[in-house]
Image: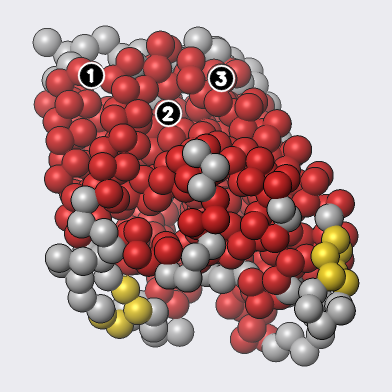
């Protein structure tokens, strides 16, 4: 017998859970790096414009599909149109690929938190410490299991007692931490060995003020594509997550109001993450400190905290507490997208589905961890980057499947079942749809074009 589908108790629970999903590692290490790389405010300007147009259209579509069908991502598309069941399978593949490697990265975060908690922060700045840790045979696996069990515990507890309850606690604490750390980051100054003094406020200028100096059309196009790629992380679309969460939203909830709140929350936290990281790294390491991906959080930032002295050890501890909260709320949403799909397709209970997914994630997570030692190899990906197992999984899920899922979803809604399907769901209960015209144009024309270009770029064609 199929288990009764749970519901968020109201708007706040839904918004906190959706925001918790979106505010993850991508916001904390990817957004600041891309902003620094993309001429500061130029990237941020592109990001904000895309968030209120392109991102708004995708977020609205997925949440509305979820609530309308009351189904998981695996089965929701088939309810809308029986010929499009395959899109549900494709969508469900995304969180299935992401979960094992996300838990691996979450393990790295817990390891660094433990280092700062035990007062051993000097270890984190030793040469090749990070590479030595992730290439270890057993320690990364142990921490991965800890992170996975924390995630599974929340999902196992269900919608109200698990996801909603913990999101309502973790998200306000995370927001308070990121605001406090960002304010401190803007007030610091440092004089390097050459006598050059840099301040946090100078870092803020590098981060926020658009610098169009020498920027070419091609470079602007790359920045625009980077901002669009970042949106997938920042609003958790094309992973099945928002469809799953939308399916737990009660019919009386004002969807448009909730979507606006999620957009605002996610954008503010993404910008604050940059205000926390860019000024601090710029002050102590200059523009050269902004490395891509894990290097920013696990190599550059520990060096910044070390340079701050005693206060740096405290800030490092708070920083990694914040990152753990962000990582767990996101991992919970990724796991929930898979669990809800199994529950709907197999009619299994939540508990059984969660246990099965946890076992899968454990096996997959061990393989990813061993990708830095026992299973190590190095390949060149179509976009020109070098990668191991984790990087390959990240490339397939983020660079290939997510834009593909978004493109096909836009075609389905824009041209097959028509935008009215989503509009009717959003306006249910006589709620207004303030950007109705923009939504129709985006989902039918502009978003598909942008997504097709992003896919071509991901495949190395552009």
Residue placed most toward the observer, 43 or 195: 195
Report the residue marked by disc 1: 350
Asked if the residue at tag 2 contacts the one at tag 1, i.e. Cβ–Cβ closer than 8 Å, the answer is no
| Secondary element type, mark 1 | helix
| Secondary element type, mark 2 | helix
Residue placed most toward the observer, 65 or 208: 208
Residue 404 horizontal/vertical position (percent): 35, 60
Residue placed most toward the observer, 66 or 45: 45
Q: Is residue 247 left or right of residue 48?
A: left
Report the residue marked by disc 2: 245
Question: How far apart, in angstroms, are the residues tagged by discs 1 and 2?
Answer: 15 Å
Q: Quadrant of the C terminus?
A: bottom left
Q: Is residue 154 left or right of residue 175?
A: left
Going 74% across and 67% down the picture, which residue do you hit?
Answer: 284
Considering only vertical position in the picture, is 314 above or below 379? above
Residue placed most toward the observer, 447 or 444: 447
Mark seen at residue 168: 3
Between discs 2 and 3, the one toward the N terminus: 3
Mark 1 or 3, which is nearer the eye?
Answer: 3
Residue 347 horizontal/vertical position (percent): 14, 20
Mark 1 or 2, which is nearer the eye?
Answer: 1
Residue 102 in sight: no
Asked if the residue at tag 3 contacts the one at tag 1, i.e. Cβ–Cβ closer than 8 Å, the answer is no
Residue 272 horizontal/vertical position (percent): 71, 47
Residue 50 horizontal/vertical position (percent): 64, 57
What's the coloring here?
secondary structure
Answer few, some or many: residues within 10 Å of disc 1's Cα (few below 14, many 20 plus, some between 14 and 19): many
């Amino acid at each position: 017998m199929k288990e009764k589908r749970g519901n968020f108790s109201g708007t706040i629970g839904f918004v906190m859970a959706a925001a918790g999903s979106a505010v993850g590692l991508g916001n904390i290490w990817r957004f600041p790096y891309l902003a620094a790389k993309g001429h500061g405010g130029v990237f941020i300007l592109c990001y904000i414009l895309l968030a209120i147009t392109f991102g708004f259209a995708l977020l609205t579509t997925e949440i509305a599909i979820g609530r309308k069908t009351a189904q998981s991502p695996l089965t929701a598309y088939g309810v809308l149109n029986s010929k499009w069941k395959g899109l549900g399978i494709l969508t469900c593949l995304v969180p299935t690929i992401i979960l094992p490697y996300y838990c691996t990265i979450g393990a790295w975060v817990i390891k660094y938190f433990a280092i700062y908690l035990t007062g051993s922060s000097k270890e984190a700045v030793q040469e090749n410490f990070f590479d030595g840790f992730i290439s270890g045979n057993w320690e990364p696996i142990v921490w991965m299991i800890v992170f996975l069990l924390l995630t599974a515990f929340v999902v196992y507890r269900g919608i109200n007692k698990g996801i909603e309850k913990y999101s309502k606690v973790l998200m306000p604490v995370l927001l308070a931490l990121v605001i406090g750390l960002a304010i401190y980051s803007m007030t610091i100054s440092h004089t390097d060995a050459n006598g050059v003094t840099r301040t946090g406020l100078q870092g803020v200028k590098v981060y926020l003020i658009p610098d169009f100096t020498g920027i070419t059309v091609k470079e602007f196009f790359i920045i625009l594509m980077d901002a669009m790629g970042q949106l997938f992380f920042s609003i958790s679309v094309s992973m099945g997550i928002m469809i799953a969460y939308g399916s737990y939203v009660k019919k009386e909830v004002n969807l448009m109001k909730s979507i606006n709140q999620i957009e605002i929350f996610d954008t503010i936290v993404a910008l604050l993450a940059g205000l926390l990281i860019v000024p601090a790294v710029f002050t102590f390491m200059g523009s050269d400190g902004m490395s891509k991906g894990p290097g920013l959080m696990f190599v550059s930032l520990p060096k910044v905290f070390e340079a701050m002295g005693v206060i740096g050890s405290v800030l490092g501890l708070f920083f990694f507490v914040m990152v753990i909260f962000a990582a767990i709320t996101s991992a919970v949403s990724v796991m929930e997208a898979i669990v809800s799909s199994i529950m709907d397709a197999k009619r299994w209970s939540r508990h059984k589905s969660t246990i099965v997914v946890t076992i899968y994630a454990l096996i997959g997570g061990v393989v990813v961890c061993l990708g830095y030692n026992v299973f190590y190899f190095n390949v060149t990906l179509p976009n020109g980057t070098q990668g191991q197992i984790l990087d390959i999984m990240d490339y397939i899920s983020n660079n290939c499947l997510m834009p593909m899922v978004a493109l096909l979803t836009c075609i389905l809604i824009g041209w097959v079942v028509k935008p009215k399907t989503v509009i009717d769901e959003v306006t249910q209960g006589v709620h207004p749809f303030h950007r109705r015209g923009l939504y129709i144009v985006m989902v039918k024309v502009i978003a598909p074009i942008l997504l097709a270009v992003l896919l071509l770029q991901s495949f190395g064609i552009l």
